[in-house]
Structures are given as C-alpha cells and as structure tokens.
Amino acid sequence: MLETPVGWVLLLIVGTVTGTLSGLLGIGGGLLMVPVLTLFGIPLVQATATSLIGVLLSALSGSVQNLRTGDLNWRSSLTLALFGIMTAQLGAWMGDRIPDPALSLAFAGLILVAIQLITLKRTLQKQPIDPATGLAAAAPAATLRQLLLPLALIGLLAGVLSGLFGVGGGVVMVPLQMLFLGETIKAAVRTSLGAIVPIAISGLARHALNQNVLWIPGICLGLGGILGAQLGTRMLPKLGDRTVNRLFRLFLLALAVYMAIRGGRGFLAPAAVGFLPS
C-alpha cells in the first residue's frame, strides 16, 4: 500500500499532521512518525530507519535558516555531532538485533522519559537569563573546552537514541543542554537542531546498508513534516500555554500506551504487530 501513489499521498498527509503536532508541541517529528508508520504494519526497525529521512530533512531546513540568520552555534553543534555520529551507528546496529516487541516497549519507555524531560525543560525555561551572556543567570560563563565533557556525553546519548529509535535526539539534548550547560531554550534548540543533521545522516547510512530504509515513503513523510512544522509553529501563538501542555501530555501518553500494547501483543502473538495491512 505504501509503495503506491495513493500511499505516497497518504504519507504526505500523515507527515503534514505529525509535522504540525511537532511544531505545535515542540517535540521531534521522529517521536511521532515512528508509531504512525507501525500502524501500517511496518516492522519497527524499518519505521525507525524511514523516520530518519523526515528527521534529517526537517533539521536541515531549520539549520540552514539558523545559519543564514547567524543564530547557529556551529562549534557546539559540531561537538555534539562528532560524538553522536559514532553512537548513531551503534544504535542502528542494536535496532537490527533487538526483537520488534522489545523495541516497541523500549520506545514506549522513551516517550515516558520524553514527557518528564520536556516538563523539566519548561521548568528550566522559567529561570532568569543574563542578557550579557545568554545563559541562565546562575550559570557561570564557560569555554568550549570546559563544556567538552557534557557536550560529549549529551552527544553520545543522542546518537544512540537517534540510531535506535529514529528520533532526532533533540527531545533529550535540549533539556540536558539547558540543565548542564545553562543554555536558553532557543539556543539549545538551535544547537541541537544543527547537531541532528550529521547524527541523522550517520544513523540513516547504517540503516541503508542494512536495507531497512523505505526511501519514497520516507521522503513523502519528510516533505509533509517540513510543511506541517511551519503550520504548527504559526498555530502555537494562538493557543494558550495550558492548552498546549495538555495536548502534549495526552498525545504522548496515547503514543506510549499504543507502543506498550504493540510490544505486549508482539510477545503474545508475533504476527500481530500492526493494525493496518502493509
């Protein structure tokens, strides 16, 4: 179904919807696209690999814009990426060897962790910012050399998650950058977005070698995701903060429940891992 023109149009629509939710709720498209792809009966490892195309296109689009405006801290992004590239290979290697049901349960756990991390991000966002440094008022200025260890650890973690689950890693990178590096929310988002581009390329390359990538469906999702993200960011100012927070929690919780049920069904009946025919 997904390899036909009708399927491509459907995926373009799905990508637009998930991209809109991504821009609206402030989470990476991969966290949404992967569960949606499994609804079509696609094995989770293929959904993970295919999602990385959309993640890459969205991150590339945003990073080019940030580079043009001079808002991209490319040194920090490059540092994150150098470590993330290595572990993205590891994550993709692991994804090919972990059974689908276990990977589904792990993905459900990732979503629950994401809920907590983004709640932390919202708390950190309220901290006062020093206008002279752009850092949290309590955070001392630091050189890139002093920040190398936390940047390395954050990049290593983001790389594993990207290769294993098909997510950009920003859902983890952004709050950790704010927590350990004292960055503002905007600076952290831009830095992580720049790092996601090479990290996603690394994971995608490994999955391509393993023949897990559905290229045309992935491109359709990615193009829809780019369009949807623009719609979501424009809708965001029109909604109250409390409304967005409730939508975010309910939607991610629903995805976590679905992936947990999918994993449980997979252990009980290995063939029953999708709701729709492929």
Image: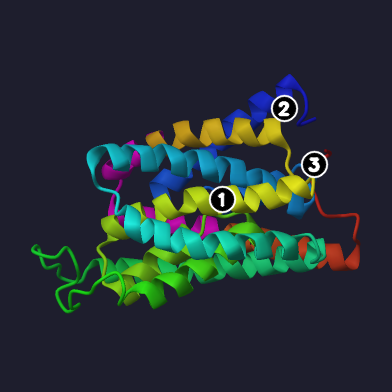
Q: Identify the residue position indicated by label 2 in the image.
A: 7
Foreground residue among 188 and 234? 188
**Residue 4, percent from left and from top:** 77, 23
Disc on the earlier residue, 1 or 2: 2
The correct choice, above or below, for 139 with respect to 202 in the image is below
Q: Which residue is rendered at x = 25% and y = 47% of the image?
A: 71
N-terminal of the two: label 3 or label 1?
1
The answer to if 51 sits in the magenta stretch is: no
What amino acid does circle 3 point to? Leu
Splitting the image into 4 quarters, where does residue 268 fall? bottom right
Q: Residue 12, located in which quarter of the rendered image?
A: top right
Name, please, the residue furthest toward the left. 132
Q: What range of the chain is rendered magenta?
A: 231-252
Q: What is the number of the mark on residue 276?
A: 3
Residue 241: say if magenta: yes
What residue did someone put label 1 on? 200
